[in-house]
Amino acid sequence: MVGKALKQSDKLIFGLIQKETKRQEDGLEMIPSENHSSRAVREALGSVFTDKYSEGYPRKRYYGGNEFVDEAETLAIERAKKLFGVEHVNVQPYSGSPANQSVYFALLNPGDTVMGQSLTAGGHLTHGWKVNFSGKIYNSVLYNVKPDGYLDIGEVRKLALEHRPKLIWVGATAYPREFPFEEFGKIADEAGAYLAADISHIAGLVAGGAHKSPVPFVHIVTTTTHKTLRGPRGAMVMVTRKGIEKDPELPSKIDKAVFPGLQGGPHDHQTAAIAVALGEALQPQFKKYARQIVENSKALAGSLMQNGIKLVSNGSENHLLLIDLTSFGKGKGLYGQCGLEKAGITVNKNTIPFDPSSPFYPSGIRLGTPALTTRGMREKEMKRIGKIIAETLKRCCAYEFPEEKERREAAIAQAKEKIENDRELVKLRGEVLKLCRKFPLHSK
Ligand SMILES: *Cc1c(COP(=O)(O)O)cnc(C)c1O
């Protein structure tokens, strides 16, 4: 996978890249914020653009020698505009969190009120969570989901009219349903707030037409580029027509917030790779890919539920599923994650709405289909994988997880040992490996 130069100059890192390649190849990556980028994306990312400094924006740089960087960044911007149908794009944020930070920096003063989906209801840290800058510097008001797992739009409206936030976020990291962007748009207008959609997780679905677009209803769209969009790690901030109508200065406010407000030199190699990924997303095949992600997610949801596993909101209509393990007891997410890892399936433990346990020992598992769909897997494989997951969870989540702290450590160690020595899981691991070999990844 990697060239000769690295093998010769740094055997340790070369070896680790080889091991990571094999780990990805031989296992099912089901963390819904992850994907497998194309070799073309990774070639651009590993290019000589990494050597360049180019503070500023195309044709307005503080350094010389940027004629090709300018072209690459302009291509990325133009492709993003076309793909998402927006008026203005900034492709320089280093990642999703800094992109969101730039929105605060552009629009709010310290102490101003912001509203976002609570982390415990699936929202992101940067939408006002207390330990994050967004909850420390700003006055954050958080909205929730209902016991059925769906957003409570009535509560959103009530809170927005009561607290009059300057900025409202819509978007999440663990929400298995479509976002009601139109309703959020009406509420933001009524409250006089800016509305930003953070589509980090679903950008690929929006780009491929498999999730409705927020663009007609919001002022700003932020997204990472490395999740369903299948690009390099990175992010973008986009301004819509509605945004410019509300505030003609919005594009320049965002640009100034990113640079010089928060960042120095842009990562030009990342920009070039984002341009490549956007080029891929503009191809007709990408629409098929996006639809298949959702079909796979629905098929997996069906299979899991048929095999007795409970899902938050009883299903999925995007790329992501949230397993509710409370029928096995409280705080069983860790055991589920460990067991699945043993079976060759990578997921993450996650809180579920109204989790009876704690964020470090949550009662859920978050998983998704973007990476498996990139490998070419379809409904048939999802059905099988759903069975494997259900079997694994039933074996591992039966172990005791004591609520008393004193007994907990020993119980966890014991459960981990049992999982480690479970012959049945070794068999399932074999099955997962067979499936992976049938859908090769990097060796294609
Ligand atoms: C992933 C994500 C982010 C942050 O992205 P990083 O690149 O990890 O900083 C922000 N918002 C949402 C909704 C996300 O899913």
Image (cartoon, rainbow, N blue to C red):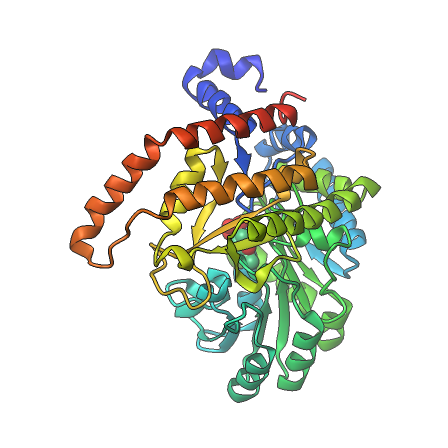
Decide: is 397 above or below 273.
below
Residue ranking furthest to the bottom: 162
Q: Where is residue 397 in the image (x, y as percent from the top left)?
A: 37, 48
Taking depth in this image into account, of 120 and 295 the one nearest to the observer is 295
- What residue do we see at 68% from left, 38% from top? 380
At 71% from the left and 44% from the top, the residue drawn is 73
Q: Position of residue 241 (x, y in %)?
A: 77, 68
Mark count: 0
Which image quarter is the C terminus in?
top right
Q: Residue 432: percent from the left, percent from the top?
A: 54, 30
Whole-percent x, y for residue 219 in the image: 69, 70
Determine the image quadrant of residue 280.
top right
* 63 shown above or below 400: above
- In this image, 364 relative to 318: left or right? left
Does any portion of residue 64 appear in the rendered image?
no
Left or right: 325 with respect to 372?
left
Task: Please indicate, yes or no, whether residue 367 appears anywhere in the rendered image.
Answer: yes
Residue in the foreground of this view, choosing between 417 and 243: 417
Judge by depth and name the residue closer to the eye, 158 or 17.
Answer: 158
Query: Is 426 or 295 nearer to us in this picture?
Result: 426
Quadrant assignment for the N terminus: top right
Please name the residue shown 52% across and 88% down the image: 162
Q: Outermost residue toward the right? A: 284
Q: Choose top left, top right, bottom left or bottom right for residue 189.
A: bottom right
